[in-house]
Image: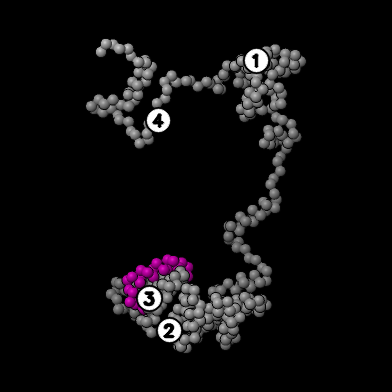
Amino acid sequence: MTGEEIDKAVKQELMSLPRTLAEDVAKNLVMVARLLDEDPEQAYGYAKVALRLASRVPSVREAAGFAAYATEKYAEALTEFRAARRMTGLQHLWPVMADCERGLGRPEKALAMAGEPEVQQLDKAGQVEMRLVAAGARRDMGQADAAVVTLQSPELASNSVQPWTARLRYAYADALLEVGREEEARQWFAKTLDADQEGVTNASDRLALLDGVEFLDALDPDADLEDEEDERDEAGAPEASPGVSGTDGGDASGETDVPGEADAPRGAAESAGTGAALPGDAGDEPLASGSSAAVSGEAAEARSEPEGAASAVSPGPSASAAESSVPEPGPSAPEPERSVVSPAPPASPAFVAPVEGEDGDVTASESESAASAEELEGPRENDGR
């Protein structure tokens, strides 16, 4: 981009600036024109730069006005349009100025501007634009039927296709739909589609909506995700396969599985609840769920168990003896060693212990060791000092 892409009339206005400055302003104006429809916010940024460089150039003020209008900054846009109109004395910005009044919530002002003499100085495209703004002001004021009448004109009835034809027909079809004339609105949406060769309106979507047709974007990944979610909802959650344990530890048939290593904590809690201790190694096979923790001697003799399992139950001890006997802890649960010296209070996170340096300062670890030794030895006797 060199800035030479701008219109000749705009280039003529920039000749009043120094060459380097004119080139910079021209480049910014080109970027405004390129980004105005695709990225209005970025176009607005380029327009502000051009406005800062050359605020006395009418084309710059006009470009800044359109950039502000595209970002819905209607008060700022109206200011820039008025400045450009004063500089040039032209009336081609009159319709968009009236539309800014609509954007500011003043449809009465916009409707009044539609009857001003400046409208007669507009060309055919400007007059059609002014008619569109007036119809929009009528609808803002709740006068939908009056908006339909406002749009009825020779330009609407003409069969010739002009740059403004598609927008005029679309506005008329939309107004008809608002007053409940759906069949006529459908016909005018179809006429709009015939005239809209550049796709400036969404007449095809509106027409399909009236016909009950729904379009899906095949390139939209979100649409595929929604279809998959709908299919999963219709299919429902998958059924649990037989033999898989549920939340209660049982299988699908209702029988209770023998707890394994993963169920050891729960088995220990059940044994503790009965008040009986089960001595033995950590590798002994636990009792089946639902059996009593204390087994009498007669039951132990009558019961046939695998070899090595009978030693896990002591026959004949009383409940008090069983409760008083404490099994020796196995290697899986070593008893934690108790510290003789009470732990010192935690140091502040912001504190940093000094490190022994060249002058022989005592470190914090040595001080703590000395304090621990004094606690172990207890108070010293008076040695007569």
Q: CA distance from mark 3 to mark 1?
A: 100 Å
From the viewer's perspective, tell me whether residue 284 is left or right of residue 6: right
Give the overall secondary structure of the magenta segment.
helix
Q: Earlier in the sequence, mark 3 or mark 1?
A: 3
From which residue to which does the magenta span run? 36-60
Residue under numbered circle 2: 91
The amino acid pointed to by label 1 is Ser
Residue under numbered circle 4: 346
Label 2 packing within 10 angstroms: few (<14), some (14-19), many (20+):
some
Is 227 within the magenta? no
* Camera-side residue of 164 and 56: 56
Q: Earlier in the sequence, mark 4 or mark 2?
A: 2
The amino acid pointed to by label 4 is Pro
Secondary structure under badge 3? helix
Q: In the displayed orientation, state which residue is furthest to the top.
A: 384
Residue under numbered circle 3: 61
Q: Earlier in the sequence, mark 1 or mark 2?
A: 2
Query: Is the N terminus in the top left, top right, bottom left or bottom right quadrant?
Result: bottom left
**Residues at discs 3 and 2 in contact (Cβ within 8 Å):** no
Q: Nearer the viewer, mark 4 or mark 1?
A: 1
The amino acid pointed to by label 3 is Arg
Q: Quadrant of residue 250?
A: top right
Q: Earlier in the sequence, mark 3 or mark 4?
A: 3
Residue under numbered circle 1: 320
Secondary structure under badge 1? helix
Q: Nearer the viewer, mark 1 or mark 2?
A: 1
Q: Nearer the viewer, mark 4 or mark 2?
A: 4
Secondary structure under badge 4? loop
The x, y position of residue 318, in whole percent, is 68, 13
Q: Quadrant of residue 175?
A: bottom right
